[in-house]
Image (tube, helix red, strand yellow):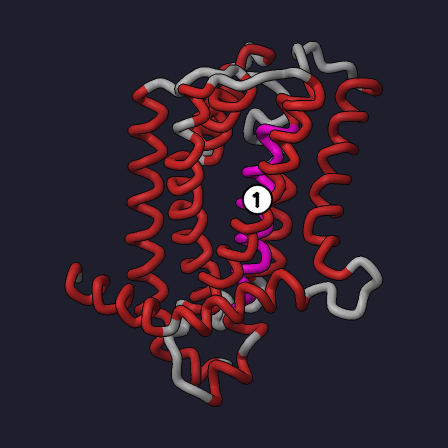
């Protein structure tokens, strides 16, 4: 299995120009023909974050210090995660003509989607640092050093799930719609708009514990909002989730892709 995985990685590297072009197509092409073009990749999530800040700081008045920063530092990785799974799950079906016409590693398709969303997230983090500088919120440089490994872990965790969903979608075309619904539910099952301490409910705390994204959310909140290095247990859990996700996702996708030509 290890040898086959390294062979797949080498094959992906051989097709790096194709991946590069497909990432550019994902970033630029989705809004091709619109006045603002690829800027919609950033306008949409920024407006989504602004809406949550206004609703929960003015209408419902959540009692969290510097709430705007709490929302931003959780929502930026969430939007990457959510968009990667929503668009990544349909990456094979959406490109069925390409899949049936030429040979290339099919894993390129979900990979290019997730990489394009990663680029969006990195740019969004750039906007976040601008807000931090303008508002004088500040950062901990020690904690900030851990932002890179946190982002890598989230990428591999997301990539593994995207492989599973993209592999299943040709066989069950409802996958994309199911993922859309799940993302609408899961956003309330992670501490994105509230803290762990705000709920003294055993069942709800269990839901938070069982939601794997909770641990990634805690890492980014810790680094950018609380300005601390997340604790060792959180790193262990997220590392385990990331490794398990990418390995299982890669194995599942390789097994499922064998019959893509027949079902597409």
Residue at left 55%, top 51%?
Answer: 119
Viewer-nearest residue: 57 or 183: 57
Q: Is residue 93 magenta?
A: no
User: Which residues lie in the magenta part?
Assistant: 72-91
Position of residue 236 measured from the top left corner of the image (x, y, whole percent): 29, 29
The N terminus appears in which quarter of the rendering? bottom left
In the image, is 145 to the left or to the right of 91? Answer: left
Does 197 sit above or below residue 34? above
Determine if residue 127 is in view.
yes
> Residue at (47%, 86%) from the top-left corner?
100
Q: Position of residue 76 (x, y in %)?
A: 60, 37
Q: Nearer the viewer, residue 86 or 155?
A: 155
Main SS of the magenta part reads helix
| Residue 80 drawn in magenta | yes
The quadrant where residue 73 appears: top right
Residues 229 and 181: in front is 229
Q: Which residue is mark 1?
A: 121
């Amino acid at each position: 299995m290890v040898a086959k995985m390294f062979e797949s990685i080498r094959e992906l590297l051989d097709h790096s120009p194709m991946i590069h072009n497909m990432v550019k197509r994902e970033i630029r092409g989705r809004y091709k023909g619109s006045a603002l073009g690829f800027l919609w990749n950033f306008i949409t999530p920024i407006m989504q974050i602004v809406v949550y800040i206004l609703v929960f700081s003015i209408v419902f008045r959540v009692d969290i210090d510097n709430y705007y920063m709490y929302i931003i530092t959780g929502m930026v990785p969430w939007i990457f995660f959510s968009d990667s799974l929503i668009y990544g799950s349909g990456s094979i079906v959406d490109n069925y003509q390409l899949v049936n016409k030429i040979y290339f590693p099919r894993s390129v398709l979900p990979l290019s989607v997730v990489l394009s969303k990663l680029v969006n997230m990195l740019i969004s983090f750039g906007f976040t640092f601008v807000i931090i500088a303008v508002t004088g919120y500040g950062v901990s440089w020690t904690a900030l050093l851990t932002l890179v490994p946190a982002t890598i872990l989230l990428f591999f965790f997301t990539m593994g799930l995207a492989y599973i969903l993209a592999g299943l979608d040709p066989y069950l075309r409802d996958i994309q719609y199911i993922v859309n619904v799940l993302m609408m539910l899961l956003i309330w099952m992670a501490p994105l708009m509230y803290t762990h301490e705000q709920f003294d409910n055993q069942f709800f705390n269990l839901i938070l514990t069982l939601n794997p994204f909770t641990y990634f959310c805690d890492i980014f909140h810790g680094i950018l909002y609380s300005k601390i290095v997340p604790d060792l247990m959180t790193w262990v859990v997220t590392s385990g989730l990331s490794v398990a996700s990418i390995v299982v996702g890669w194995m599942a996708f390789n097994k499922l892709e064998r019959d893509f030509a027949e079902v597409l």
